[in-house]
Each structure stands twice: as C-alpha cells, then as structure tokens.
Image (tube, rainbow, N blue to C red):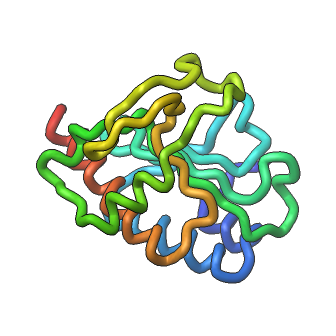
Amino acid sequence: MSEQKIEDCISRILIRDAQKNALEFVSYLRTNEMLFERGGGYWADKFYWYVKCKNEIVCFILIGSEEKPEEKSDSWVVWSDDSDSDWFKDFPLDENMIKTAWKNVDICVKCGSCSQQGRRKTILGREFDNVCGTTMRFDDPDVDTLECMKKIFLARKKDIIKNL
C-alpha cells in the first residue's frame, strides 16, 4: 500500500460519525505535537498507525477493518500502550472518565499478538485480571469516549516528557 497521511485514509475509508470523530481525534493529537508512523510487519497492509511523542508510543490507531482494509467502514480502534496508573498521578481524571477508562480495559483474548498473555493490573485504582499488553482498547469511540481518550493520551504525553 502506498504511503498516505492518516487523515486521507480516514476520509477515504470511514463514514458517518466515525469519520468525523476520527478526524477530530487525529487533529487533537497533531495539535499536541504527536507524530504518526505507519505500522509495519503484520500491520503493513492495513491502515494502522503508531502515534508517538519523543519517539515513545502514545497509542495505536487502526482505521477500518483489519480483514478488509480497503472497504468503507464505520469501524476504527485506538489502543493505549502498556498504560499504567502512574500516568495519572499528576493528571487526575474525573469519575466519569475513570468509568469510561475501566469500561475500555483490554482483556486479553490470547490472540498471540502480545507476549504478556494477560496479567493482573491496577488501572486507576481498580484491579483487573488478564489485561492485554495494550491496556485500553477503544472501539468506534463516540464523542464522550473521545474526550476521555484525549485526557488519557495527553497524560501519556506528559508522562513521556516527565521521564525523559
């Protein structure tokens, strides 16, 4: 597949609210000085991006279907990296955002993509079993979930900068 900007892919593949929400999210990330790198390996023929700050992963984005990448869709997914409650010590979330984060904890389904095979983690004060290496997974996020995602990934950026 040829190289292209994530915005071009979103405009070509996503439809309806998915397109609007994804473009808003990507714009927010770019405004906050995050960079987009097209995925390789297994992800090379899909519309998958690493989002980075200071060469550290902030999140991952998949546009459209993993199985049929060229097909019009209202599906997109955003994963966190191996997020940690420490991210939020200096960047607290309100109760609604915490509940949204908990609702989107990525429980390992043994797909083979991570070497962790699920583990016990404390996420924003609550214990979870069998958590994937990508701690949170946001499928087709709505406007309210987008607001939570923005805060989570801004907290990640601040954590990266703090630990340089």
| Rendering coords of residue 82 (x, y %) | 42, 33
Of 110 and 31, which appears nearest the observer?
A: 110
| Rendering coords of residue 143 (x, y %) | 49, 77
Residue depicted at 62% across the width and 55% down the height: 77
| Quadrant (top left, top right, bottom left, bottom right) of the C terminus | top left
Left or right for 98, reference 20: left
Picture layout, residue 147 above or below residue 50 = below
Of 122 and 81, which appears nearest the observer?
A: 122
Q: Is residue 96 visible?
A: yes
Q: Is residue 133 visible?
A: no
Q: Quadrant of residue 122?
A: top left
Left or right for 74, reference 162: right
Of 117 and 51, which appears nearest the observer?
A: 117
| Rendering coords of residue 146 (x, y %) | 45, 69
Picture layout, residue 52 above or below residue 104 = above
> How many marks can you see?
0
Left or right for 160, reference 51: left
Residue depicted at 44% across the width and 75% down the height: 144
Picture layout, residue 163 above or below residue 31 = above
Residue depicted at 14% across the width and 39% down the height: 162
Residue depicted at 27% across the width and 65% down the height: 95
| Rendering coords of residue 101 (x, y %) | 40, 55
